[in-house]
Amino acid sequence: MTAVLDQPTGYLSGSAEHRRVSIALFAAGVTTFALLYSTQALLPELARSFDVSAAQSTLSLSLTTAGLGVALLVAGTLSEVVGRTPLIHTAVFAAGVVAVLCALAPTWHTLLALRLVEGITLAGLPAVATAYLREELHPSLHARAAGLYVGGTALGGMVGRLLPGAVAEVAGWRWALAAVAALALGCAVVVRVLLPPSRHFRAVAPGQGRLLAMTRRALTDPGLLALYGIGGCAMGAFIAVSNALGFRLAGAPFDLGLGAASLVFLVYPIGSLSAALAGRLAERFGRRAVVPAGCAVGLAGVLLTLPDRLPAVVAGLALLTAGFFVIHGVASGWVPARAHAGGVGAGQAASLYLFAYYLGSSVFGGLAGHVWSAGGWSGVAAMSGGLLVATGLLAQVLRRTPVLTPTSEAAPGPARP
């Protein structure tokens, strides 16, 4: 049974359109994050193949996230004018094409340039995904749908690490990147076929003063600013551990090969489950109660990785993954809700959140290589733990920030002062 309802109700749970939206954005999340992190498991192999240092090899990821972060600032504002679905379709197809070119890159600098372009092309999806969900689905589904989308990104992050690692073990890094590119193009077809066009989007005419006013509010609202900081710090903590982990597992006392080391990322489905669970918990207890819990779980995971025992490292990564996706799953859905309540363009606010998110990834992901070289795993763990503590402090600030409109921002769960 279909349930296409007039604004502002949106698609209801169980409708054919709701299922199409869920599958399409889940697939889009998979392809985006598989491409984004496709070089992470390959960092030791890239360092050997191109004769670069560990710190230099992380540029293949940091430049991609930097390009994505900067492009988000344009994509979010652009989406307020041209719409959500055109950007999503363009982004997923263009990113798949660039991924094919990455597999053919003849030199290290060419690969870096293409990875930068990859990040720019990817920006269209994350810039508008949560805004699209808020506009097209029934309000009762917002937190749950955001959790499902973030769950797709978690699965994409796992595939982007496992698939290249396994392929590179037998065929080299070029075929590894080609395999991820093929997956991305397949997912792009799924998105094109299934994703319903926007029905409730209302464009802002170019040049209107209202667009500038919305931008100003997006940069001055204390709740949104705290959420931007939460995204940047949490992502920085997570990516620092993920970037340095391959180098740790390749050396003593683990001495794992590329394929075996990438298997630790099998814990990533925990991120999908925790993001979906976080959405349901936010509906019951409120967003302000769930984010600090995610910080505590993530910090426990970082501490658990300290011993030189593989089971402890894997368990610690699993806890860190769960905690991170609780934080991001709730915060990313909270941003457009608060933006809407405060008269801010949802696409703009989501883009600013993700700009901070990927800025944290670029800065601390790149710094992780230097910290690893200088201080080993204890240094990486200290940096990641410190960032999670900062995330927790920002969450406490957010708990004291007044709710703008209980019926919108605080709809999932009881309002918190």
Image (cartoon, rainbow, N blue to C red):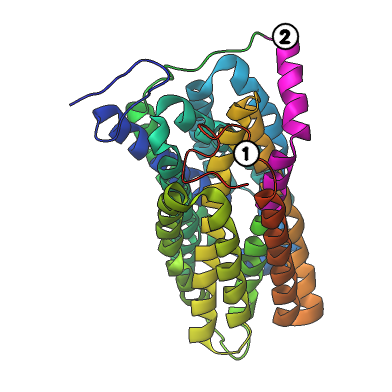
Which stretch appears magenta?
A: 206-233
Residue 206 falls left or right of residue 406: right
- Residue farthest along the left direction in this orientation: 1
Comparing 47 with 210, the one in front is 210
Residue 5 percent across, percent down from the top left:
32, 18
Which residue position holds label 1?
403
Q: Which of the labelled discs sits on residue 55, or is there none? A: none
Residue 239 falls left or right of residue 179: right
Which residue position holds label 2?
208
Look at the image and tell me whether residue 50 can be seen: no
Residue 361 percent across, percent down from the top left:
69, 54
Give the residue type that dot 1 points to.
Val
Instruction: Residue at 61%, 41% (x, y): give it.
Output: 118
In the picture, residue 373 is in which quadrant? bottom right
Q: CA distance from mark 2 to mark 1?
A: 28 Å
Tag 2 secondary structure: loop
Tag 1 secondary structure: loop
Comparing 388 with 281, the one in front is 281
Comparing 390 with 150, the one in front is 390
Residue 257 higher or lower than 403, as above or below: below
Task: Name the front one of labels 2 and 1.
Answer: 1
